[in-house]
Image: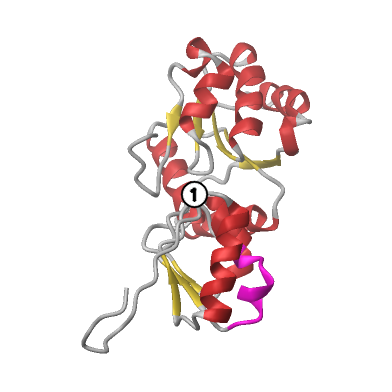
Amino acid sequence: LQPSDGGRRFIGLDDGCDPGRAVANAKRLIDDERVDLLFGLTAESCVEAVADSAAFKDSSIEIFAPVSGVDHLAAKGRVTYLRPGSAEEMVEIVAKFSRLSLMRMAFVHAASPSMLAVRDAALAGLKARGLTLPRTYVLKESAGNAQALVSTMASDQTQAVVIMADSISAALLVKQLRPRLPTIFICLGSTVDVTSVQQLVGAQLANGLMVSRVVPDPAN
């Protein structure tokens, strides 16, 4: 939209939550339109794709207020979030569990560089607040090591677990975790789509799952 008074110009492009279109739109905005800022990117996959794109990396453009529940390492220092970070999210979940007198906790997370950074920042935040540090475990893609993780948590008598992974991996872990440890508190972080998890695990196993959201989402 070009204002008649010569003020700031806003260009709106729809990526349809498709990472490929998001990258193409970003390239056009950066290279052709010479915009000063990317605003309003939506969905973790689209933000990650743009942050990792050549057009973004070769520019000095910043991303402002992406609607994303995770931190994007590729855009570190060039993205401004208007919500708590993923590390802060984990700290608050663990703090809530601690107030419920749950001391044997686990943090299961994806193996991506951004999630490893979240883990380290969260552990530092928990330590600074004097809270009990959870045991941390990496969840392989498609929950390839779910059975081993469940056995470990059973052996440790884990009382509560926070899962920060993609929807499919999280759901596959829950499907093995719930029958083996029916009384464990399970909290899914902002990286999962609740509807997808419900469909994958079924209504019975999904009943009682807790969900955290740092970005409000009416569909979730």
Q: Amino acid at mark 1?
A: Gly
**59 and 87: which is toward the camera:** 59
On the image, the x and y values in percent for residue 112 come to: 70, 52
Name the residue tied to disc 1: 16
On the image, the x and y values in percent for residue 14 come to: 45, 56
Q: Report the number of numbered marks.
A: 1
- Looking at the image, residue 172 sits to the left or right of residue 43; the answer is right
Span highlighted in magenta in the image: 50-59
Is 190 part of what is drawn in magenta?
A: no
Where's the N terminus, which quadrant? bottom left
Q: Which residue is situated farthest in the bottom direction here?
A: 6
- The residue sitting at 66% across, 32% down in the picture is 169
- Looking at the image, residue 220 sits to the left or right of residue 193; the answer is left
On the image, the x and y values in percent for residue 117 come to: 63, 59
**159 and 206: which is toward the camera:** 206
**Label 1 SS:** loop
On the image, the x and y values in percent for residue 202 come to: 53, 14
- Considering only vertical position in the picture, is 25 above or below 157? below
- Considering only vertical position in the picture, is 66 above or below 207? below
Q: How is the image coloured?
A: secondary structure
- The residue sitting at 53% across, 28% down in the picture is 196
Residue 37 falls in which quadrant of the image?
A: bottom left
- The residue sitting at 44% across, 16% down in the picture is 207
- Considering only vertical position in the picture, is 146 above or below 98? above
Main secondary structure type of the part rendered in magenta: helix
> Is residue 116 visible in this depiction of the protein?
yes
